[in-house]
Image (cartoon, grey):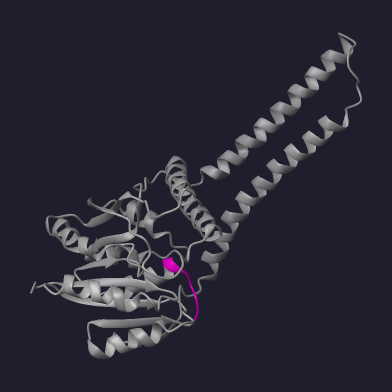
Amino acid sequence: MTNFLISIVIPVYNEEQNIQPLLKTLIPILKPYQYEIIFVDDGSKDQTIPLIKQEAKKSQSVKLLSFQRNFGHQMALTAGYHFAKGACTITLDADLQDPPDIIPKMIERWEKGAKIVYAKRTKRDSDSFFKKLTAQAFYRFINFLSDTQIPDDVGDFRLLDREVVDFLKGLPEQSRFLRGLVAWSGFPASYVTFERQKRHAGETHYPFSKMLNFALEGIASFSVKPLRLSIYLGFIASALSILVIAFKSVQHFIFHQGDWLPGWASLFFSIVFLGGIQLITIGIIGEYVGKIYKEVQKRPQFLIKEKINL
């Protein structure tokens, strides 16, 4: 047995089919270590909580933290970090797409001095073409916009040193994009690669709509460049309008060609173009105003319903 404690934080939401297979795989890997497994239930409506309670009765190392309602994956991870007591904390999902068998490699990199150990995907054959394409586009886009570079093909399967966990706990912001916050901290990082597997059971909890919201949250949390882009769009629209007016004026007054009265096509194009830019700009500003609104409210990041073995 090692002389340090390892915390495993697992956010769960309607994962009744995955709890026992996950523990059956995970516990033998953790036997050489002192460990705690903290399940953070994000408002499950199936038998996830009763199954975890059964496992918690068998072992004090299995712990449960349940929310009053669904607060989201990032808040579940945040709560896990708040209650983790280990010298290092590893977060992973319950669907076994994050393979627990690379945990010893992650711990080995941590023991060599890395404060952050990312699990980096080398293959995503289990994901659809659309999901792989959108994930690639997301990382390129957010890294283009943000001053903080987020590593490609890494999710929330990672190891954090106690120092990094305490740093994250001390951050006051309400909107938590943890992938960005971890990268922004600047602690020494290392990587362990793995091939992403198929989901063991159940359906993904991240459809396209949630992926899009997650991407917008990340971009708005780590960059003000979209606000500047809206200014550039305004200048471009104004410049195009001036060019069109100049062209039509020259055509009419100098060459006496064309119809001075605008046609329906050009009028329609102008209205749609300018209206689209205005809506995009208002939407960008609204996203940042919404984040300010959340920060000013200072509501709790999550509400705890029940704690077991914690």
In this rendered view, identify the residue nearer to me: 107 or 133. Answer: 133
Q: Is residue 309 visible?
A: no
Q: State whether the magenta stretch is mostly helix, strand or loop.
A: loop
**Figure check: 240 above or below 64:** above
Q: Position of residue 129 (x, y in %)?
A: 46, 48
Residue 71 in the image, given as x and y percentages of width and height? 48, 73
For the point 31% across and 89% down, the residue is 54
Of residues 290 and 2, the one nearer the viewer is 2
Residue that appears at 69% across and 47% down: 279
**Res. 163 visible in picture:** yes
In the image, residue 134 sits, relative to residue 204, either above or below, namely above
In the image: residue 59, left or right of residue 207: left
Count of marks overlaid on the render:
0
227 with respect to 22 (left or right): right
Q: Is residue 239 rendered magenta in the image?
A: no
30 left or right of 251 in image: left
Residues in magenta, as a range:
69-74
Q: Residue at x 39, y 54 (%)?
A: 180
Residue farthest toward the top in the current orientation of the protein:
255
In which quadrant is the C terminus drawn? Answer: bottom left
Which image quarter: residue 296? Answer: bottom right
Q: Quadrant of the N terminus?
A: bottom left
77 or 172: which is nearer to us?
Answer: 77
